Image (spheres, coloured by chain):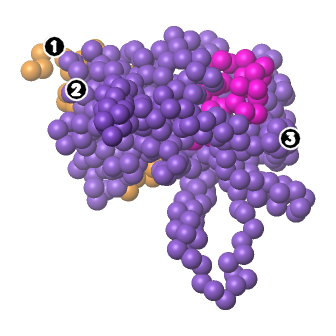
Amino acid sequence: MSCWLAGLLLIGVLGGCAQAPMNAPLAAYRPDAGYRFTTLDAGDAGDGDGLYVALAFSGGGTRAAALSYGVLKALADTPITWQGKRKRLLDEVDLISTISGGSFTGAYYALFGPGIFTDFESRFLKRDIQGELGRQLWNPVNWIRLASPSFDRIDLAAELYDRTVFNGKRFDALTAARHRPFLVINATNMSLGRRFGFIQDQFDGLGSDLGPYPVARAVAASSAFPLLLSPVTVRNYPAPPGYERPAWVDGALGDYEVNRRRYQRAREWTLYADKAGHPYVHLIDGGLADNIGLRDVIDSAQDAARPGSIRQLMNQRKIRRLVVIIVNARTEPPETIDTQRRAPGALEVAMKTATVAMDNYSFETIELMKDLAGAREQARRAVEDCRRLLADRCPSAAQPPPLNEIRFSIIEINFDSIADPKEREEFLSLPTSFALPPATVDRLIAKGGELLRQSEVFQELVEELK
Amino acid sequence: MEYLLVHFPERRRVLIDGNDQGRTDETLELERGTYIVTLSPPLDYKPKKRKVALKRTSPVSPLEIRFAKRHASDK
């Protein structure tokens, strides 16, 4: 009995020592430093933003990671001519916004560039990550560590990703590289139920320096599937010297009736500013707030206040061609509940409750992006028509200034567009897992490229950029 | 989306809530809402800032605001 007690005591003492790494406080507020879109080089001098390409990688475990990797490969194989220069479409990618499984591909490409085409398959896609995570749980040393209140299952996962996939890289490495694409790894703030992006602009609100934070922990937060994995916790520190609340927040807080979205964004800032009420922020799978990674792109296309946002670059007449490629690895396993008289059980109802709302939201998110592009083009044409009419019928009248022309290409890659019904059903039935057979991974990679190339919008884009 | 057109006798950058959003005499596209509009330096314009509530504009009928040149004799 005394041995048991001594053993438990030892576990308690040693376990108490285990600490997950915590985000660092920000020594001083510097809007011109850290991992922000605006601190990265635009690329080719003079016209770095002219052709703006944004990628959104959805969640869906290895299935999503492999599909988005296949799209990256296809972009690398797509030659274009822009401003008289021959290049690959992949070289023009400015922004990658990722969720869960898609975060592995996005983060790997942002960190290692073309190296992804050498070793990502062996280092991630074709590994049994799920099995490796399970074996971590059988390691007695980890039992002791997990006994600590400051160390949880997600921390084991983050350590595994850090050691075996991301080589211990921190966000500082992305800042130091100074080149685009700008990576936004998205998680969900449990308390707000809102998107949380691992970028310095967001960490400013936490009074924290994203630089020394491991990329692997951000990816782990983005893919911390509820219940299977615990949340990632970050500290909300006091604001650093020199930090001032962004000026837009004051105006937006009064816009509750006028613009609820803007008001909501402002309110989030005030909640992060409430350090006493929210000293910690708990982050889970980004898929809960947006399972396709597109919301960040949409926010960027709407919110001019965000430094370096798509809207700001549009207003500054920098963007002339906006390409958004959405890689949506959504599945739709065969449904059998309608074949039985018996009503679905509690588990089935719970699963449907969780997934149906999210699928509908994802669908509407993609349509919103298309509507934004359509409305912009409509507005530009309306001004052109007005100017033409005035010039024709009332030449002395003052004309409204023209809106600059921006060509939009909104491309969605999904399994629904697979033509062959049998093959479509196979892909739509793939599980969400971090362990898929290598042959399935190969098929997903090939399918990602194939679906991109068969997209009519993509074909038009490539034709125009020949 | 809402539309704002800022006038000033000289070509100047327009700052919305302190962020560069483009130039005078060009239509700026912003979300519906309340903003503080200023111009880039030199601070030779008046008023010092304008608070605008953007709503119910259209691309052919943007909200138009004007800044005047401030001369040394102006207080």
| Residue wearing tag 1 | B72
Q: Residue at x 27, y 15 (%)?
A: A28
Q: Position of residue A213 (x, y in %)?
A: 43, 22
User: Is A429 placed left or right of A388 in the picture?
Assistant: right
Could you say which is closer to the camera, residue A221 or residue A181?
A: A221
Does the residue at mark 2 contact the one at mark 3 (Cβ under 8 Å)?
no
Q: Which residues are magenta?
A: A99-127
Q: Which chain is orange?
A: B
- Is A198 magenta? The answer is no
Q: Which is more N-terminal, label 3 or label 2?
A: 2
The residue type indicated by label 3 comes to: Ala
Quarter of the rendering occupied by the N terminus of chain A: top left
**What number is the disc on residue A439?**
3
Q: Quadrant of residue A204?
A: top left
A238 relative position to A49: left or right: left
Q: Position of residue A414 (x, y in %)?
A: 74, 51
